[in-house]
Image (cartoon, rainbow, N blue to C red):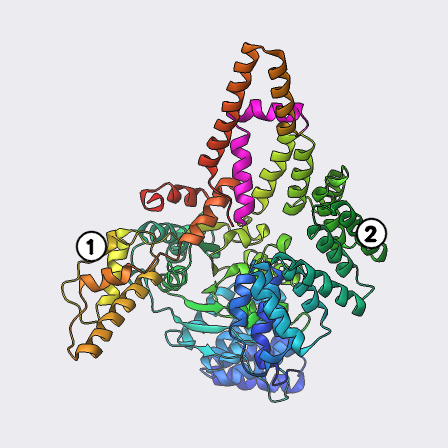
Amino acid sequence: MTIDRVDGLRSALAVAPENHVLRLLLAEALMDGGQPGEALVEYDRLLAAEQLDDHGLVAGGRAALAAGRHDRAQAFVDAAGAAGAVNGISELKREINESLGLQQMVQVVKQGVGEDGIAQPPQLEIDSKAAVTFADVGGLDDVKKAINRTIILPFQRHDLYEKYKRGAGGGVLLFGPPGCGKTLLARATAGECGLPFSNVRIEEILDPYFGASEANLHDAFVQARRFAPCVMFVDELDAIAFARRKHSGSVGRSLVDQLLQELDAIGADNENILVLAATNAPWDVDEAMKRPGRFDRVVFVPPPDPAARERILALHLSDRPADNVDIARLAKQTPLFSGADLRALVERAVDLVIDEALERGEERPVRTGDLEQALKDMRPTTLEWIATARNYVEFANQGGRYDEVAAFLVSREARS
Amino acid sequence: MKTTMDAAAGPLVLARHDLARGRPDRALAALAQVTGPELETDDYWSLRASALYELGDWKAAAVAAQEGLEREPTDFELLDVLALAQLESGRKKDARATIDAALLLYPESSVLHAHRALILARSAEKAFRLASYKKAHAAVDEALRLDPDCEAALRVRAQIAALSGDARAEMYAAELLALDPEDEHAHLISGVARARRGDIHAGLDHYLEAARLDPADPKIAWLGRNSRVLKSRFAAPLLYFERLTRGHVRFAWVLVMIAIAQAHQPLLTAAAGVFWVYMWAVHIYVRRRVGKEPK
């Protein structure tokens, strides 16, 4: 029956090749008949003639997917985006993502020079579904809870949030002293959401040529939108979204404008992109970034508490020969130490043991004393950040932006 | 089209970007990534010298600028940074010589004229202060003649006025604030000018505003903290006395003591003694609350 119908439609089209309704019927019949490759040819012709409505674009995308042509499927999605189509597009995107098998690394395209010798814009690195989860992040329980409530649940309970017209995605800014796990936490958030993770770095965005940096930033967002739902991570946000007030040049400011435009686009027609950003210097981030719809959720990532320090120390000692190290005691002796500081502490202690082994020719495990010996020469690297943060809390907290930091600064650890 | 040189342009571009956004520490970190032939460019040394200068490492900044000038002896930025770094590191004669040499190469540069004015004002010897300030004023006038909107010249003019006790300092600072109400340095100049006139409260307000705008600067934050403590009730009588004497408390205090000694009034002498103790108490109180001025 279907074959007869297909033949009939082909005959009719031979007589009237410009009849787009007939061509659409043929494409649908071919799909029904299990011939997605041929259906795709017809959908492609209709797409070229701009004769596909929302439904047709989605159907074309599905035909492309069924034919194993992800590039063509993406072309239908792009056309739908350009036409402002909404219905069914998200589902189609999801189907494309699933088909692409984002469990593995999807695409890593590095900056390079094209065949024509012209520099290609740096491409976004889309990672696997981030393998890291909250279980891999030591401590920070309060921060994890806050992230779970405000970021992860909207993705996991999409139906519930949609019912209340509360969309997933948006912008979240993590800030805190260096080395305290902001980047790891962002990666873990992506892992908890079960989404692909892309990393945007200032080195990949900046370009000495006029307008090229802005174009690179735009490309990064375009690519992230293609893979939505996904998590986009902007490390060192203050480098891209620097406070324009403090910037002495005029050229670089347009980069901030571009980022603002991209973030605003997310609210308008690019749901399901979560933009996570991290910075050591939230005060250097342009104020406009912190307005609703942009990075409106700001999360303070403090230095690890004693329990977290215990876990971090245990983690760093786990694959090294160690002998009954009193981790709890060390955790008490290392207030304000960041995760990176604790790693450095363990490495220094290990160096001491290695030096001794080289001297005496006798190998022994790391002991509490070695760590305490190494600790004598170390100070937490967070102190400078805390001093600056204290000044900001004292003089620039009129809007209550640094209330979390203020609460941390009056804690026993910070005062010790 | 990118060339092979651009492969190393990354850190330089990043450093320039970091410097422009006021993060010389990051700029230096980016410059540490530069390798190969880029290390021999004046661009690299210019960025390095500027970053070190911004970080307050004057001596290293001067060394970096000199390294760059060995490669490109006529580089404008390097000459400018070298002169300023020499000034800050106490080599005032060298600073004057450098800026004069730079002006021989770029006589139409308003920025160089402005910086020459600053160097002249800052290197004024006590005995010849008035003559130096006069020369500095002339240099800044020349800078503004060349470019009436030159921000560096407007800033230096206000700074010199504040340094020399010129009554126009407040007006000049107000002009800077009109250009950018969030200019912390203009607030500082305004604060100095107001305090000099004895309007301590208004001066302290300007210091506090400067601290609000740039708490990351430890010196400005210290000044802000100082101002906050001085604005407490405890220091109010002292501030009132400052206002009465239009900022000349010490001079007025000597006169009061002489007058009391002449009058042989025990009550007045006791009151003066109490006030003297109170002034010391305020001094100690502020010091304890705020701590030493950061270096």
Q: Which mark is residue A112?
A: none
Q: Quadrant of residue A77?
A: bottom right
**Left or right: A356 as drawn, with respect to B133:** left
Q: Amino acid at mark 1?
A: Ala
Q: Quadrant of residue B56?
A: bottom right
Q: Residue at x 64, y 76 (%)?
A: A20
Q: Residue B218 colored magenta?
A: yes
> Quarter holding the N terminus of chain B?
bottom right
Q: Chain of mark 1?
A: A
Say which residue label 1 marks: A328
Q: What is the span of residues highlighted in magenta in the rendered image?
A: B217-246
Q: Residue A1 colored magenta?
A: no
Say which residue label 2 marks: B138
Locate residue B196, reporting x and y percent: 68, 34
Locate residue A377, reporting x and y percent: 31, 60
Q: What is the C-alpha distance between the residues marked 1 and 2?
A: 68 Å
Task: Name the mark nearer the viewer: 1 or 2.
Answer: 2
